[in-house]
Image: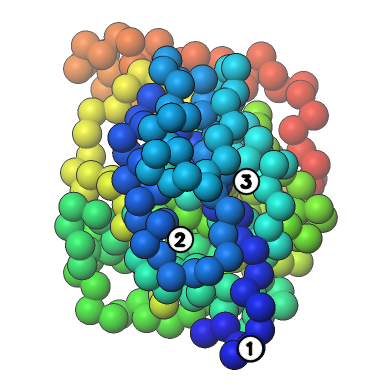
C-alpha cells in the first residue's frame, strides 16, 4: 500500500468522548492492535460528568486527552482535536468504532494515488453484524426532500462495492483528510452542533475542487444498531433544524425554493399530524423548535457559497 522505504507519515486520530468512557477505551484498544507505525491519538472529552483521563491512559498510555469545559457537540469537539493535531493526516472517528488492520494504510493509499482527494472514508460494517455493510458511499442529498441514503446499507458484503470511487459525502464516523487541505477549506462548521455538519463540510471541500472518496480496501466496524430505535426529542430537534440549515447553506435557487415549498406543503403537515396521532408531544415541540430556529435566524449570514 504505502511505497516501500517511504517514511510513514504521522496520522492524528481524533475521537470524541461524552459519558461513554468504556466504549472509547474499546476503540483505543483496537487502535493499539493496529499495524500502522506512526500515529498520535487524541481524545476530546466533551464535558463528561466524570473525568475519563485515567481510564483512557490505562488503555492507551500515549493518548492525548483534551477536556472541554462545555459540550461543544460533534463539530466543536472534533475541531478542538484538529487544532491540537500535529499529523500530516487527520483521521476523525466515532468513539463507537473499532479499527481493523490495514485501515489507515488503505486510506493513505488514496491520497498518494489521487492528488484531488480531500477526504476519504473507509467501508463500514456493523460491529454486531460483521459482514453486513453500513456504508459504501453516499447518495446525493435530494433537492426536494433534503434527505439522502447510504450506498449498500444493510446489504451482505459480497464484494459488490469493492471499487475505489468518488462519492458525495464522507461518513462522519470515520473520515480522513490532510492537514494542508484543512488550511484551505477550514474547520468543521460548528453552527450545526449535531447532524448534517459532515455533509456541509464535504460540500466545502468540493467547492474548493477536492473530491470525497470511498475506499473499499479499508474496513471499520461501527457499533450502530441495524434497527432504527425511537428517536429522542433532541435528535428530532437537530435533524429538523439542520436539515433546513444545510439546504439553506448549500442549495442554490431555484432548488432551494422547491425544497422550502416541499417542507411547507408536505413535511410540516405530515410530521405534525404524525406526532399528534402518536401523542408524541415532546417530539412535536422539538420539531417545531427546529423549524422556528431557522425562521429566527433567517437573516444570519449562512450562505458563503451559493446564490
Q: Is residue 270 above or below residue 256?
A: above
Residue at the disc numbered 3: 200
One can see residue 170 in this view: yes
One can see residue 214 in this view: no
Q: Which mark is residue 138?
A: 2
Pinpoint residue 23: horizontal percent, then vertical percent: 32, 39
Pinpoint residue 107: horizontal percent, then vertical percent: 53, 71
The Cα–Cα distance between marks 1 and 3, rounded to whole angstroms, is: 38 Å
| Residue 304 in which image quadrant | top right
Answer yes or no: do the residues labelled 1 and 3 have beta carbons within 8 Å? no
Of residues 148 and 9, the one drawn nearer to the viewer in this rendering: 9
Give the structural element (helix, strand or loop) at label 3: helix
Q: Which mark is residue 250?
A: none
Q: Earlier in the sequence, mark 1 or mark 2?
A: 1
Give the structural element (helix, strand or loop) at label 2: loop
Q: Is residue 113 above or below residue 196?
A: below
Pinpoint residue 252: horizontal percent, then vertical percent: 71, 47
Give the foreground label among 1 and 2. Answer: 1
Amino acid at each position: 500500500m504505502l511505497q516501500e522505504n517511504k517514511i510513514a507519515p504521522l496520522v492524528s486520530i481524533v475521537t470524541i468522548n461524552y459519558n461513554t468512557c468504556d466504549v472509547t477505551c474499546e476503540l483505543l484498544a483496537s487502535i493499539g492492535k493496529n499495524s500502522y507505525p506512526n500515529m498520535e491519538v487524541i481524545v476530546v472529552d466533551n464535558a463528561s460528568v466524570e473525568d475519563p483521563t485515567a481510564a483512557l491512559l490505562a488503555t492507551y498510555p500515549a493518548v492525548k486527552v483534551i477536556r472541554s469545559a462545555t459540550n461543544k457537540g460533534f463539530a466543536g469537539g472534533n475541531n478542538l482535536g484538529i487544532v491540537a493535531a500535529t499529523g500530516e493526516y487527520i483521521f476523525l472517528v466515532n468513539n463507537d468504532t473499532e479499527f481493523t488492520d490495514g485501515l489507515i494504510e488503505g486510506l493513505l493509499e488514496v491520497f498518494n494515488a489521487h492528488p484531488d482527494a480531500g477526504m476519504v472514508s473507509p467501508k463500514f460494517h456493523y460491529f454486531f453484524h460483521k459482514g453486513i455493510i453500513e456504508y459504501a458511499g453516499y447518495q446525493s442529498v435530494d433537492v426536494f426532500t433534503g434527505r439522502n441514503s447510504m450506498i449498500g446499507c444493510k446489504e451482505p458484503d459480497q464484494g459488490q462495492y469493492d471499487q475505489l470511487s468518488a462519492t458525495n459525502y464522507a461518513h462522519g464516523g470515520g473520515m480522513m483528510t490532510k492537514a494542508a487541505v484543512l488550511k484551505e477549506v477550514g474547520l468543521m462548521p460548528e453552527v450545526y452542533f449535531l447532524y448534517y455538519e459532515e455533509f456541509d463540510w464535504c460540500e466545502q471541500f468540493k467547492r474548493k475542487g477536492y473530491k470525497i472518496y470511498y475506499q473499499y480496501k479499508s474496513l471499520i466496524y461501527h457499533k450502530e444498531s441495524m434497527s432504527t430505535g425511537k428517536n429522542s426529542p433532541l435528535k428530532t430537534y437537530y435533524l429538523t433544524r439542520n436539515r433546513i440549515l444545510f439546504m439553506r447553506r448549500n442549495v442554490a435557487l431555484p432548488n432551494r425554493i422547491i425544497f422550502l415549498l416541499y417542507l411547507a406543503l408536505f413535511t410540516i403537515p405530515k410530521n405534525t399530524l404524525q406526532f399528534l396521532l402518536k401523542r408524541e408531544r415532546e417530539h412535536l415541540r422539538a420539531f417545531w423548535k427546529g423549524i422556528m430556529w431557522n425562521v429566527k435566524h433567517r437573516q444570519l449570514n449562512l450562505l458563503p457559497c451559493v446564490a
